[in-house]
Amino acid sequence: MIRKAATCALALFAALGVAGMAQAQTTVKIGVLTDMSSLYSDLSGQGSVNAARMAVEDFGAEKKGIKVEFVSADHQNKPDVGSTIARQWLDVDGVDVIVDVPNSAVALAVNGVVKDKNKVLLVSGAASADLTGKSCTPNTVHWTYDTWCRANGTGNAIIKTGGDSWFFLTADYAFGHALERDTEAVVLAAGGKVLGKVRHPLNTADFSSFLLQAQASKAKIIGLANAGGDTTNSIKQAAEFGIVAGGQNLAGLLVFITDVHALGLKTAQGLIFTETFYWDLNDDTRAFAKRFAPQFKGVHPTMVHAGVYSAVLHYLKAVEALKETKDGAKVVAKMKEIPTDDPLFGKGTVRADGRKVHPAYLVEVKKPEESKAPWDYHKIRATIPADQAFRPLDKGGCPLVK
Amino acid sequence: MFELLGIPPQALFGQLLLGLINGSFYALLSLGLAVIFGMLNIINFTHGAQYMMGAFGAYFLLQYLGIGYWWALIISPIVVAITGIVIERTMLRRLYNLDHLYGLLLTFGIALVVQGLFRHQYGTSGIPYPIPEALQGGHRLTFMFLPNYRAWVIVFSLVVCIATWFLIERTKLGAYLRAATENPSLVRAFGINVPRMITLTYGAGVGLAALAGVLAAPIYQVNPLMGADLIVVVFAVVVIGGMGSILGSIITGFSLGVIEGLTKVFYPEASNTVIFVIMALVLLIKPSGLFGRPASQASGVEHAGAMAAGDPGRSALKFIVLLGIFFAVAPFFIYPLFLMKALCFALFACAVNLLVGFVGLLSFGHAMFLGTAGYISAHAAKVWGLPPELAILSGAGSAVVLGVVTGLLTIRRQGIYFAMTTLAFAQMIYFFALQAPFTGGEDGIQAVPRGMMFGVLDLKNQAVMYCVVYAIIFGALLLMYRIIHSPFGEILKAIRENEARAISLGYRTDRYKLMAFVLSGTLAGLAGATKSLVFQLASLTDVHWSMSGEAVLMTLVGGLGTVFGPVVGAFIIVAMQNYLAQFGQWVTIIQGFIFIICVLAFRRGIAGEVARRIGRPL
C-alpha cells in the first residue's frame, strides 16, 4: 500500500516536472514577511502585501512567462517567530524571495537564514544600516531607507538652517542608539553641539518628564530617536507643554507619513524629517497612491510600501533576465548589475554592499491651512541627491566591499 | 543636596508635579482593579483594554455624534461599564469559586480579542483627540509650564479616588459590599441581592478604567494598544498597595508616579523597571503589600491545592512514551524546525507545570530562566567558542544560579504574591538583558554557530540537530517523571497537601520547595539553552513577561494537574503561532478566543479531559 502510494506520488512529481519543463515557465514564490498586528502594521503590514501584488501586475509577469505565487505572514515582531517562518518558507514551501521585514531585529535574523539557504531578501521596512554594513550578505538588498540615511538627511538639513544645538530623546534600544549615534556624528561634524540626551524605555506613555529635561537644556533642536507610538506621543506632548511655542524645534528621526496622519496636522505641523518617497511627488506616484489607498483602508502609501513595490519590480526584472530563481546570490548579483528604474523612485542602482540608492527628500509637515486634501501633508524642503543620501560605500564595514 | 544630585530645586519640583500627574492615572486604574479584586476576587486583566475602550468611546462620541469631552466623561464610562456587566453576567460569573488564575486567564483572553478587533479596525498608529477648549493652554508657574489639562487631570482623579474610597469604606452601601465579600451567603440571608451587587461592582470598576481612558485621550494617542502594557504596571501598583485595599492602591498609585518621575530624571532607562524593583522589595518585607490584610494569604494556599496534580502512575509514563513515539515519527511529516521549537517549549511549559502541580506555586517569571540560559549559551557558543554541549551546560548552569538566588528570595511567598515576586525578578532580568552590552539589545545575539556536538555530531545537519534536541528534551522529561516518583517527589506532595504536618514530621519544607524551584528553573533554562542553538539566536522575546504568560497558557491548554499535558499544550500553541501566521492580524484574536473557550469549557485542558475520560491521571 505504502509502496503503491509512493510510486504514485513519484509518478505525479515526474509528470509535474515534465509539464513544468514543457512550458519553460519560471516560477517565483514571493513571501511577504511583515508586522500585521502591532507597532509597524500601518506603515507596512497588509499594505506591503498589496504593494508586492501591484508590482507583479505592473511587471506583467504572466505575459513574460513568469508565474508568481504569494505567501505572507505576521512575524509578530519576534525574531524567533520570524526566523522559523523564513526557514520553513525556504526549506519546505519553496519561497524564493522574502520581502519587507519591518523591525531590525527580525530582519537581521532572517538575513542570516536567507544567506544560509542562498535565497533573496529584499528589506524595505527595517531601518538598521547594519544590513548593508557589518551584517551585509550577497543575498540581501536593503531597499528603501536606513538609519544612516535619515539621520544624515535630517541632521544636515537642520544644521544648515541654524539648528546647531541638539538634545536627544532616544528609545533605549539598539535602533534608537544607532539613530542617535549617526545623527550625533552628523551634528558634530557640521560644527554643532549636543547639549544632552535622555534614554527612555520603549513604549513609554508619558514623555513630559523627558520633555521638561529637554526644555531645560535650552537646545534649539530636540531630536526624537524613537519610533511609532513613542514618537507620536512625544510630539503630541511637546505641543501640550509649549515646547515648540517656546522656540525649540522637533526633529523626527524615524517618522512616517502614517504617524503624521495619526497626529493630525495641527499637532504635527512644522515637523522636519527625511523620506525617500512621498505619494504626491509626481504623476506616477500619485497614480500609484490612487490605486493603493482604496485597498488599504484609505491609507496612502508610505515609503515602505513604495519600497516593496519597487524592490519586487526590480527583482522580477533580474529573474526575467536570468530565467531562474534558485541561486539567490546570482539573482542579487544580477539586480546589482542592471540599473533600477521604476515609477516611484526613478532611476537608481543597487550597490555592491546591497544598498539601493536613490534620492532622499527633506520634508516639512504642512500647516493645517496649507493642506488642501486628505493626506496632503508634506512640503518638500530639499532633495538630497542619490550619491549623498546614503552612507558612503567604504564607511559601512561591509566585507563584500573590497 | 540638590547640587549633588545635579539638578536645581525648581526642576525637581517640576518633575515631582509631573510624577503626581502620572500617578493619578495609576491611582485611577489601580483603584478599579482593586475594587474588582476586593469584591469579586477576580484579577481583571481586561482592565487595560477597558481603559482603551474608554478612550475610544470618547473618540466615537466626538466623531460620530459630535458629543464633546465633558459629556464623554460621563457617557463613555457608562457604556464601557455596560459591556463589562455583560462580560460579568455571561462569563466571569462561572469562575467565582475557582482559583484566581482562571479569572486572570479569561480576562486576558478577552483583552486579546478586544484589542485585536480594535486594532483590525483602527490600525496601530492611533487617532488624535483634542484637548477640550476650556482646558487648552497653560500656566507658567515659577518652576515649570503647567498645561491646564494636566492640572485638571490631577484634581479630577483625586476627587474620584476620594469619592470611591468614601463610598466603599464609609457608607452603608460600602458596608454591604464589604460584608458580601467576607461572607456572601450570610449577607444574602439578610435579604440583599448579592449577585446583582457584585455585577454592579464589576461595572463600576470597569467604569473607572474607562474614565481613566477618557482622561488620557487628549494627552496620549487614542490607540488600540494603549492599555496592553499598562496592565502589568497597574497590577504591580495594586499588589504593592495590598490586593483589595482601596486606600492602598490610591496612595501607592500616586507615590509610584512620583518615584517613577524621579527615576526619569536620574536613571531614565530604568523608569519602566523601578516599579518592579519596588514591588519585589515590598513583597519581600511585607508579603501582603503595604496596606494588605495578611488573611488573603491563606486563600492562596487553599486554591493552589485545587490545581495540583493527581498522583500520576504508569499511565503518565505510557503517555510520555506515546508522545515520544509521536515526536520520533513526526519529523518525516512535519517540518522539523517547527517540531524542535515545540519540543523546547514543551520542556519549558512542563517546568512551569512542575512547580504548579507539585509545589502549588504558579510562577509568572519563568521567562527569566528561558531567556538568561538562552543568552548565556548563545554567548558561550558564539563568543567563547565553546562546543554545543558545553554551551548548553553553561546556559543551564546559569539558570541554576539564577534559580538559587531568586528562589531563596521568593519561595516563602504564596499564591498571587509568589507569582508577582517572580514577575518582578523577571522584569529586572529583562532590564539587565536590555542594558548589558553582550546581549545586543533588541537585535539579540544573532548567527550563533551550532557547532559539532562532542566533536562528532554536526548540528548544522537538520536531522542530527533534531535527534539531539529530541534526546535532550525527552531525557529531561523522563528525569522529571523519575524525580516525581522519588522519595523527594513524595515529600513535595506531602508538603503540598499539608505543609504544617510535613514540618511536624521534621521536614524542612522551605528547603524542599527551594530545591523544586531550582529544578524547575534549571529545566526551563535547559529549554532556553537548547532553543538558542536551534534558532541560532537569543533575543529579548524570551525574557519578556509575555513569554512567562505563554508558558502558563501552554500549561492550561495542555492540562493543569497532569504531568506531561503541557507538552500537548506547547505543541498546540506553537503550531498556532506558526500556522496561523498567515492569518496575520487574526492570530491574537484567535488565541484570545481559545483562552476563553479553554477557561469556560475545558478547564482541565486537553490531557486533563482525556485523563478524565479514561479515568486515569496523566
Image (cartoon, coloured by chain):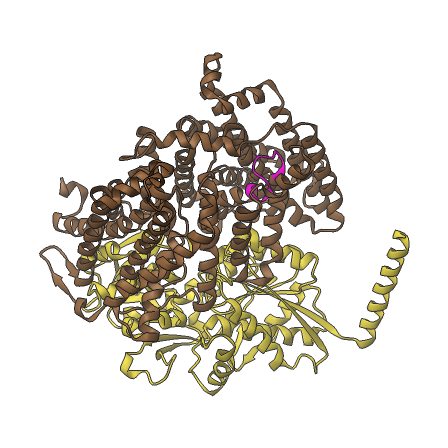
Labels in figure, total: 0
Q: Residue A265, percent across and down?
A: 31, 75
Q: Residue B95, percent across and down?
A: 47, 44
Q: Is residue B440 left or right of residue B456?
A: left
- The answer to whether residue B288 shows anywhere in this view is yes
Among all residues in the image, which is located at the extreme left? B142
- The answer to whether residue A157 shows anywhere in this view is no
Among all residues in the image, which is located at the extreme bottom? A283
Q: At x 31% / y 37%, what residue is drawn? A: B242
Chain identifier of the yellow chain: A
Q: Residue B126, percent across and down?
A: 38, 66
Q: At x 28% / y 66%, what residue is drawn? A: B72
To which quarter of the image does residue A351 belong?
A: bottom right
Chain identifier of the brown chain: B
Q: Nearer the viewer, residue B453 or B53?
A: B53
Q: Residue B221, percent across and down?
A: 33, 64
Q: Nearer the viewer, residue A11 or B120?
A: B120
The N terminus of chain B - image quarter = top left
Which residue range is magenta in the image? B555-565
Q: Is residue B532 left or right of residue B197?
A: right
To which quarter of the image does residue A341 belong?
A: bottom right
Membership of B414 in magenta stretch: no
Membership of B558 in magenta stretch: yes
Q: Nearer the viewer, residue B316 or B221?
A: B316
The C terminus of chain B - image quarter = top right
